[in-house]
Amino acid sequence: MDVTTCLKSLLMAINQYRDSKTATNAAQLQKQVEVSGLKYDQLLSSGQVLPSECVSGLVELAGNPNTIPTLTSSIISLLAQLASDDDTREMLHSSYNLTSTLASVIHCHGATPGEPLVLQCLQVLQKLTYNTRIFQSTSYIHELITFLMTNIQSHNDDIIMPCLGLMANLCRDSHSVQSLIKSLDNVKPFYRTLINFLAHNSLTVVVFTLSILASLTLNEKVGEKLFDAKNIHQTFQLVFNIIVNGDGTLTRKYSVDLLVDLLKNPKIADYLSRYQHFSACVSQVLGLLHSKDPDSAAKVLELLLAMCSIPGLRSLLVEVVFKPTGPKLRAAGRRQGPGLDGGRKAESGLALVQWLSSPVEGAESCSLQALQLLNELLEEALGADTVSACVLSFVEMLLPVLLGLLKGLDPAQGDAHIRKHCYHITHVTSLLLNILYNIQVCSEALLKTLELMSKLRQQVEDMETSFYRMLQDQRIVSPLSQALTSHHRERVQTGLSLLFEATPLPDFPALVLGESIAANNAYRQREAELSVKRVAVQDVPPPRTNISVLESSTGSSRSVHSLVEKIQNGLELQEQTKDSRVSEIIDVYEQKLSAFASKESRLQDLLEAKALALSQADRLIAQYRFQRAQAEAEARKLGCLLKEAECRREDLQGELGNQVLEVERSKADMEELLQHNTRLQKDSEEHQALKGAYNALLNRSENNLVRIFKILVVTKYKMIFLVSFKFTFFYLQLWNFWTLSVLQEREEEIRSLRSDLQQKDSDIKGLNAKLQAEMEKLKEKDGEKRELEETVDVLRKELSKTEQARKDASIKASSLELQKSQLETKLKQKEDELNKHSAMIAMIHSLSSGKMKSDVNLSM
């Protein structure tokens, strides 16, 4: 069954158990987890969706309190197998929150710390949080720290060690966790417990305890007492012994981390530089490099790199690493001072070279660390005033290995392999450059390397930064000046290309380069003058006084004169023809040169005109920008005024609404008063009717006094009621008058507010009109700006064309001048030949005339 099928089956089992937590589904899921244990270690980092969903589901089930403990233990075992490398651990911590999940499991089962599930979670957490910064905001971190501090102070030896290891991970480089621990109430008993653990018989417990104390108390009074000058040498000896003779790789890792953390304190680093057994301890630590364990070698190299960062320790490391095994001898040579025999190689250095190209699986990081360490050590060793013979011998042995590392690139292995190989080559190249810089040899190789870096700077990460940093180094002056003043064309071209790249850099040593070039030229000129003098002295022949030789020379001169006389006529004709042709050629070239000169002057005038136009355009652009800034400021001012008017209008609108509500309430009150008045009027009418009835009854029954008395009483009561009614009516009339006056005042205020609103609306309309006008002006300015920019672009294009034409013309002029100089040299040669021929003809003519005279005398 392939991996994809296994993943699908596992995801299906996860979903089934999540939906229904039955025993059957649990057994099926546990079977899938146990069967597919070692098949997903590389799939998680591939970025595929199916493995990510499976891991998310497993983490969710592991953190669910309702999951059965056996299934949770199986899931945690599988997740621990996945965390095999640093990338996967980081992914499980950051992307899947496995740290918080395991902390929640420990919190749920915190009542039984000796339970196997809790111990398993502690072990996985220790593996997961190693070299990982944990923050206080992480879920369940408070509960986890409380659990660890409680169980560290317990007497259960089975749980103390994993709790100490996890606490060391949490405290390292995490200021938030350190602050949380220091703020707890039981921190002092916790410190006392840790100090008591320093006398434990297990070296692992001692290392964990020292790491926690260093993280929590190194910069406090407790730490100053623990790591003072009296105790620090014992601590160094203890840590070095644990590194060399530790219980295993885990103890060695934490010991190295402890020493690296201690070296971050300048005072402790100074103590270590004065430690009398430092060389012996480092030699024993370097002996661990001869093993085939990449994890141990990586931690040793990490420790050595941390020591190299301290200037006082770097020189001591150089003496230990490059110290040979043979007796001390005195070697002589260039830049070699009194030192050790160069023929005997240092064992530690050989171990470093072996890790550069080790075939052991997982040794890639060790190779890079070894390159970095050699870079630091050789920079220190070769940068000294005198270099020992053993260092130079080591460099001779190292160079072939480094050159071999530059090979072996196989494009068929994929982009990841190419990326790793290029990163490896970057470090190798940096080490080679360091060696070349410090020895000041192989300048041609240095220039070729810089040329290669220039070509690869866009393809390799951080290559461009390194390239420009090297170009600004003072040590580039000597090889660059040698290349620029070289007799080889390729070296000069390489130097010019590098000079073109380095000239714009701010810290490029241009003045130093000029002085170096001048010094090289002066030296070569002096050598040339001395060589010319030596040649002149060697070419002077000794004096000869042999008479026979003189006679032979006169005889040969006579024969030469006769020969010159014979060919004199033909040579004169040829000379005339040659002189006429050369003069014609010179005239043609002079005409061409004058034409080019006039064309160059026209181009120069055109260039000046274009420059003037560009300056005018720049001035117009500056004016436009100033006007635009003013317009934008006015627009912003108008916008602010508009916003203020809007706010004022909203306030007035709110006040108007309140006044309208008050008017409506007054109208409602008036309606209620009117209704009450109508009711009172009806009562008055009824009273009048009763009064009439009373009068009629009074006229009819004057004899019935009782009824009259009753009627009088009733009437009296009604009269009293009528008086009260009149008083109430009068009060209501007064209230009505006051309400009407208030209503009139509110109406006047409403009218004034409406007039103010109308005025504000008119002002807003005016401001909007002004704003639109300004916007139209801005649009016009933008159009003018675009036109000016187009004009500037056209002018720049024309300027570039004219500059290119001027360059072409200057190149042609220079070539013509070169041809003219060549022709002049040829003409001078021809003139010299003609002079020689004329001299020969004259000699021949003189000889022939003398011979004719002698013949005439003989005939006579």
Image (spheres, rainbow, N blue to C red):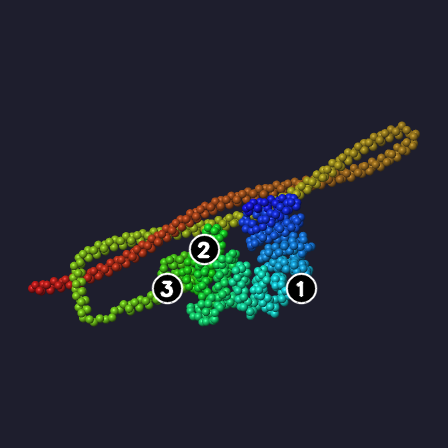
Q: Amino acid at mark 2?
A: Gly
Q: Position of residue 372 (x, y in %)?
A: 50, 60
As measured in the structure, the alpha-carbon distance from the residue carrying label 3 to the one carrying label 2 is 42 Å
Residue drawn at point x = 16 percent, y = 62 percent: 562
Count of numbered tags: 3
Circles 3 and 1: CB atoms closer than 8 Å:
no
Q: Position of residue 187 (x, y in %)?
A: 67, 61
Disc 2 packing (10 Å; few <14; some 14–19; many ≥20): few
Mark 1: which secondary structure? helix
- Closest to the observer: 16 or 443? 16
Mark 2: which secondary structure? loop
Residue drawn at point x = 39 percent, y = 61 percent: 483
Q: Position of residue 841 (x, y in %)?
A: 18, 61
Compared with 43, 325 (above or below) is below
Task: Identify the residue at the far left of this view.
Answer: 860
Residue annotated with mark 2: 408
| 3 vs 1, front mark | 1
As measured in the structure, the alpha-carbon distance from the residue carrying label 2 to the one carrying label 1 is 57 Å
The label number, if any, that marks residue 192 in the structure image: 1
Residue annotated with mark 3: 521
Which quadrant of the structure image shows residue 537? bottom left
Disc 3 packing (10 Å; few <14; some 14–19; many ≥20): some
| 3 vs 2, front mark | 2
Q: Position of residue 567 (x, y in %)?
A: 17, 58
- In the image, taking residue 556 as reference, residue 422 lies left or right, namely right
Q: Amino acid at mark 3?
A: Asn
Residue 323 seen by the camera = yes
